[in-house]
Image (tube, rainbow, N blue to C red):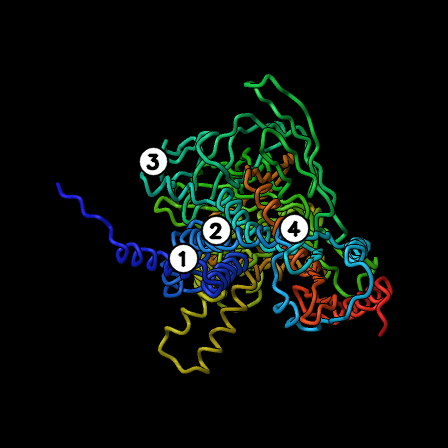
Amino acid sequence: MSIIEQTPQTASTAASRRSIILDFLGSMNLAITIFMIIAIASAIGTVLKQNEPYENYIIKFGPFWHEFFLSLNLYDIYSAGWFAFLLAFLIISTSVCIYRNTPHMLHEMRNFRLNSKIKSIKLMHGARSWPLQGDPDQATKNIAQLFKVQGYQAKTKQHDDRVIVAGMRGRWNRLGYILGHMGMIVVPLGFVMDSTMDIAFLEWSGKRAIDKTSVYVKDMPKQSQLQPDTLVSFRGNVSISEGQKSNFALLRIRDGSMVQYLPFAIELKDFRVEHYDSGAPKSFESDLVIIDKEKDVRFEQTIAVNHPLYYRGYTIYQATFGDGGSKLKLKVWPFHDYKQRTLEVDTFVRGERVLDTAAGQLTLEIIDFKKFNVRPAQEGDPKGKKFVNDGSSYVFKVRDKSGQAREYNNYMSPVNQDGRYMFISGMRTNPSESYRYLHIPADDNFSVDRFMNFHALLNNMERTRAIAIRAVSSALEDAPDSEKHKDNIVKTMMELLDRFNYGGFDAIRHKIDQTNITPAEKDKMADAYQKVLNTLLQAVYMDVLQQEGIDSSKPMSESQQRFYFDALATLSGLHIYGSPFYAQLADFTHVESSGLSIAKLPGKNVFYFGSLMTIIGIFLLLYVNQQRLWAVIYKDESGQQTLVFAGSGSRNTADFKRHYQQLVEKLERVLGISK
């Protein structure tokens, strides 16, 4: 093996390369460029909500831009590899600046420059020179004392040919540079400690994987479960119902999630919320119980917005609230069932129930419950109210065997609609749509009984045929050949009723449009069908009123007529409702839940410390002016004792110029120098 000695030229080349690399890494332009890119990326991460479900981004931006933003990892910027690279580069660049300049800065803070030459001091801006009378030693002492009185640290050095008195104040200005740059290192380190980069590393190494399919935490695979000591930091959420407890937080990560277990359990003892008249939450707070079996600790504490709970390095915030599994009692009214076999269903929010219906087996999925529904009052409200509470409502889905579902929002109590009370049921086929509402008129007892009885009777072909025969017989009582036409009219009535039951007036019109007649004849046929069908519908409605004990021999009242026409409008549009039943909310037991945000952020204090260092550093740089003074006493060529005085500031401001002029005047008075 041969040994190659390093020649001076080789060493010089290596040193030159090292100097070039250090110059590049320590370049202020490079640091500013990186800092600006990080600032822009952070602004994007602030404006663009991070770690949302991908469906939300697709709806908002469209498929093309969604894929483009996804390729840049803009939905999880703070765990992106390129963002980590920029932070690392900023730390390295700033560290190089500190490495190269700190020794010089520290030396400048201690160096009074007592070896300065007379010529260099004379060349300084504003330097003054006087012939000196009297004892030079006494003059030296007076000058040093003057510097100290003016707030300068003063040092004196005797040379062979001169005596120098040097003064310095504001030496901590140089420390501002060091602190400011060190803060720019500490702040990113604190940010990295509290970022999701450790999760990204776990995913990259294959030790953990996000879960994209599980609905419940208990179903998550082990690779998506994180023990208390797995992550340095995290931010997660959990919703706890009253009387329940939890020992985990759910971490939403891109298009999936992970579960982070805690070293203690959190129990929600009670939750309270106050509302404004508008229905908006005024304040809400949770009574929590911390149960730590490992430390044998159990204590209670109330948290509210901006008043979190701190325990074992974890911070528990009051974030939101919602339904905690309210118990609901439903009365299911089947459509197109003349026997009106209603079903009593006991369920709860986030619960499911399989129902046997005329359309086959359907799954009833309870999504949410709202105890109050507050809306602005209409103009001219007689009670002068600004807001109206429409009562409770619940949201559910009806899902068939193929997995297709429609979402419904049903109100428990009838809602006043322009003086008429209606049971409201909203329907939509997907969450991006607005609800389309079905209005079921309420009867005199503010119930759906009359409407449901009316609808059930319309589907009882045997009863309606008997009513049709009775109505036609009464109408044709005095007409010649009534028996000859009665059967045809009754048959037409029943055919029209069958179409109306399953398609409304639109189905009848569609049948007319299929006939091969002129448009004028179609309109005449429509009018005729309308009269024939209305005769039967009114007769059926009167039969319903008679069952309620109302005298059918008397003309219908105004409210009864209004109910009749509202019911026809509802029945005519019932075919687009999409559900073979109406699920009425009969009763409920409200259970609330508290939405907690749980964070473990050890880098927070590091971030604050770095920010404080940066602020102090900037303050020292901006408001502490390093100022230096020199007074040199020497003999000139003629043997005359001469005083040279000069000064400089780190910033040549007008304030220092005035201060320097005042020092000149004071120096002349102290030394008895005539102007």
* Alpha carbon distance from label 4 to label 2: 95 Å
Q: Is residue 387 left or right of residue 36?
A: right
- Which of the marked residues, 3 or 1, is nearer the chain's N terminus? 1
- Which of the marked residues, 4 or 2, is nearer the chain's N terminus? 2
- Which of the marked residues, 2 or 1, is nearer the chain's N terminus? 1
Q: Which mark is residue 22?
A: 1
Q: On the image, numbered disc 3 is attached to which residue?
A: 207
Q: In this rendering, is residue 133 above or below 574? A: below
Q: On the image, numbered disc 2 is attached to which residue?
A: 99
- Which of the marked residues, 4 or 1, is nearer the chain's N terminus? 1
Task: Mark 2 and mark 1 in contact? Answer it, CB < 8 Å.
Answer: yes
Q: On the image, numbered disc 4 is attached to which residue?
A: 545
Task: Mark 3 and mark 1 in contact? Answer it, CB < 8 Å.
Answer: no
Q: Which residue occupies the foreground of this view, 288 or 228?
A: 228
Looking at the rendered image, the disc whose residue lies closer to the viewer, 4 or 1, is: 1
Q: Position of residue 473 (x, y in %)?
A: 54, 60
Q: Residue at x 58, y 49 (%)?
A: 410
* Residue located farthest toward the top when viewing the structure as drawn: 296
